[in-house]
Image (cartoon, rainbow, N blue to C red):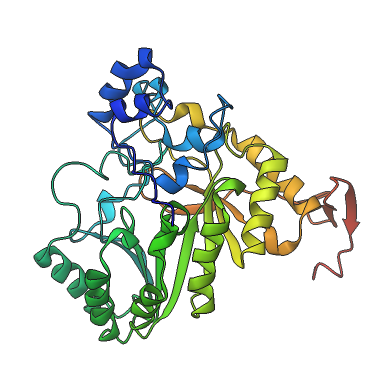
């Protein structure tokens, strides 16, 4: 068996690997002083070194553009901190909470909305007291039906630690659903084992895994096998992607990504508009372009391949769908005008509309 490549975590390692030119070394070192760097061997193998605009490298190899911040960018663009009653918990919606178990990831996205907090020196996961307080908060709030395990990446934790956490959830009857947001199946496919699936299912809850993937090449054969281990064990998978300039902001790539996910038995769930984290403006795609891409997806692809195009309202006000609207009133109180997937208008009768 071929030994996997070692991860790259420093400017010097990126230069030595030929992924960053020597003249950019100082800029990358400056970035590394603020934001974590990490690219796993599995992801390094997917980079096309002959392509200076490679979409895999663009997601994970730091660039000098990260040193440029815009006035509308903030370290906490989704407002997590305002809705954190105890360390590790974000309680924004009545029936669900985020539990940020880990502050590390197997690889670090250059557009991450939590980039100011993940992977930094210090505690890499919730300590025993903080974890007990977070689990206690969930246990004391019977309205919480779903817990979303995030971070960082919850699957960066050891199997032993995950088993302990799953055992604690087994004792909380009102929590019925656990959802884990992760990149591990594409970043470190070998970490996804039948043992890991059994550990998650030992919670006694309905367990879902949400895979973060932004380009069809991330769904390598190894990644697909890793996802199949979860799915075959009885853990359904959904996806979340971020619409990123130079990565997936064309219809061919976006359609290929959604089809690749469905072929791997992963239901496309969210397509996120980019959150305004510091130094990420070079990844932004105009909302109007995102809406047009969604129109094209609707016309070209099966309904199974359709994600929800969503935006997190800054300040912690939650997600809202921002996809295109296909329905309009022709005149106030009159029949509706509805547009088909080719953009052609059609009148919809009042009676059929329930008016």
Quarter where residue 127 is shown: bottom left
User: In the depicted view, which residue is nearer to us: 275 or 122?
Assistant: 122
**Looking at the image, residue 14 lies above or below residue 86:** above
* Left or right: 42, with 169 as reference point: right
Q: Residue at x 58, y 45 (%)?
A: 215
On-image quarter of the N terminus:
bottom left
**Looking at the image, residue 212 lies above or below residue 68:** below
User: In the depicted view, which residue is nearer to us: 313 or 136?
Assistant: 136
On-image quarter of the C terminus:
bottom right
Whole-percent x, y for residue 113 in the image: 38, 42
Residue 277 showing in the rendered view: yes
Which residue ends up furthest to the top in the rendered image? Answer: 23
Which residue ends up furthest to the left in the rendered image? Answer: 129
Q: Which residue is drawn at 34% across and 42% down?
A: 7
Q: Which residue is drawn at 42% across and 32% down?
A: 61
Whole-percent x, y for residue 293 in the image: 70, 42
User: In the depicted view, which residue is nearer to us: 68 or 145?
Assistant: 68
């Amino acid at each position: 068996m071929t030994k996997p490549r070692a991860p790259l975590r420093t400017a010097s390692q990126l230069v030595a690997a030929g992924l960053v030119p020597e003249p950019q070394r100082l800029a990358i070192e400056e970035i590394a002083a603020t934001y974590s760097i990490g690219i796993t061997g599995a992801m390094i193998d997917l980079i096309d070194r002959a392509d200076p605009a490679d979409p895999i490298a663009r997601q994970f190899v730091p660039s000098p553009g990260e040193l440029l911040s815009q006035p509308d960018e903030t370290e906490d663009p989704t407002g997590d901190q305002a809705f954190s009653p105890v360390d590790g918990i974000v309680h924004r919606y009545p029936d669900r909470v985020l539990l940020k178990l880990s502050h590390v990831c197997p690889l670090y996205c250059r557009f991450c909305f939590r980039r100011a907090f993940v992977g930094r020196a210090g505690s890499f996961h919730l300590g025993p007291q903080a974890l007990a307080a977070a689990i206690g908060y969930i246990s004391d709030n019977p309205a919480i039906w779903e817990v979303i395990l995030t971070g960082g990446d919850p699957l960066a934790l050891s199997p032993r630690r995950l088993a302990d956490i799953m055992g604690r959830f087994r004792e909380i009857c009102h929590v019925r659903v656990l959802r884990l947001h992760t990149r591990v199946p594409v970043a470190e496919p070998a970490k996804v084992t039948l043992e890991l699936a059994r550990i998650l299912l030992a919670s006694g809850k309905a367990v879902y895994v949400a895979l973060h993937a932004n380009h069809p090449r991330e769904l390598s054969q190894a990644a697909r096998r890793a996802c199949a281990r979860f799915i075959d064990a009885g853990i359904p998978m959904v996806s979340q992607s971020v619409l990123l300039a130079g990565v997936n902001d064309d219809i061919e790539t976006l359609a290929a990504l959604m089809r690749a996910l469905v072929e791997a038995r992963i239901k496309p769930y969210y397509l996120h508009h980019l959150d305004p984290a510091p130094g990420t403006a070079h990844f932004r795609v105009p909302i109007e372009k995102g809406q047009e891409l969604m129109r094209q997806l609707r016309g070209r692809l099966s309904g199974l391949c359709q994600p929800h195009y969503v935006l997190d309202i800054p300040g912690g006000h939650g997600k809202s769908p921002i996809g295109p609207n296909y329905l309009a009133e022709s005149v106030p109180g009159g029949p509706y005008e509805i547009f088909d997937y080719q953009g052609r208008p059609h009148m919809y009768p009042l009676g059929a509309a329930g008016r």
